[in-house]
Image (tube, rainbow, N blue to C red):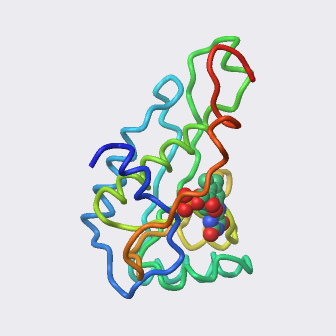
Amino acid sequence: MTLKELALKRESCRSYKESVVSHKELKEIMETACLSPSACNSQPWRLIAAEGEKAKEVSAMIQKSGRNQFVEEASAFIAICETPAVLRAGVCFDQQHFAQMDVGMVTMLLTLAAADKGLSTCILGCFDEEGVKSALKIPAEIPLRLIVAVGHAKEPGVREKIRKPAAETICFNEWT
Ligand SMILES: Cc1cc2nc3c(=O)[nH]c(=O)nc-3n(C[C@H](O)[C@H](O)[C@H](O)COP(=O)(O)O)c2cc1C
C-alpha cells in the first residue's frame, strides 16, 4: 500500500463490530505512533491504551459528554496526553505552542498505523475530560488532548473523502 492509499483508507469510523483489538496490536500501533517527529525531539506525549473493562469505563466517560455515543461499540481507546516539553531555548520556540502540534502528529501517525493493520479508528476531541482522566489516573496537571477509538469497522469499504478543493488549500510560490 502506498502512503496515499493508506491516507485514503484511514477514515473516522463511527460503527464498530463486536470484535476485540488485541493488546499486541494496540502496543504495536502506539510504538509506531511514537516514531512521530516533535520539536527538539521533545516527544511531549504519553499514550494510554484502555482495553477490556477499562475501555468500558472510558467509553462511559466519553459518552457522558453527551456526544460520541457511537464509542459504545469500540474495542479500545487510546488517550493522548500532552506532557511538558523540554525545548532548547530560542526565540522562535517562544512564539508557538509546539507540544500541541506534536500531539496532533503522534495522533495522526497512530491512526495511520492502525489503518495499516486493518484497524479502524476515530479521533475524539469531545469527552468528559475529568471523568476520563480519573478512570485512567492521569495527573490533574496533565492535559488530555485527544482520545482515539479503535476497533473493527462494521461496514467494509471506505467512504469517498470530502475535502476542500486543492486550490483553496495548496498553492505554489505565493499565497493565491
Ligand atoms: C482534533 C480532532 C477532533 C475530532 N473530534 C471528533 C469527535 O469528537 N467526534 C467525531 O465523531 N469525530 C471527531 N473527529 C473526526 C473528524 O470529524 C474527521 O476527521 C473529519 O470529519 C474528516 O473525516 P475523516 O476522518 O473520515 O477523513 C475529530 C478529528 C480531529 C482531527
The C terminus sits in image quarter: top right
Question: Which residue shows up at 60% across the image and 57% down it?
Answer: 162
Task: Say if 170 sits above or below 104 in the image.
Answer: above
Image spot of residue 84 (x, y percent): 59, 38
x then y, percent, for residue 10: 44, 58
> In terms of image quadrants, where is residue 130?
bottom right
* Residue at 70%, 77% in the rendered image: 67
Nearer to the camera, 135 or 168: 168
Q: Position of residue 59 (x, y in %)?
A: 56, 79
- Residue 158: give x, y in percent of width and height: 43, 67
In the displayed structure, does residue 44 sit left or right of residue 92?
left
Is residue 145 visible in the rendered image? The answer is no
**Between 88 and 172, the one nearer to me in the picture:** 172
Between 76 and 50, the one lying in front of the other is: 76
Query: Visible in this render: residue 158?
Result: yes
Image-based side of 172 in relation to 22, left or right: right
Who's the residue at 56% across and 52% down the image?
81
- Image quadrant in which you'd find residue 154: bottom left
Instruction: Check the image and report above or below for 162 versus 165.
Output: below
110 and 153: which is toward the camera: 153
Seen as rendered, the residue at the extreme bottom is 18
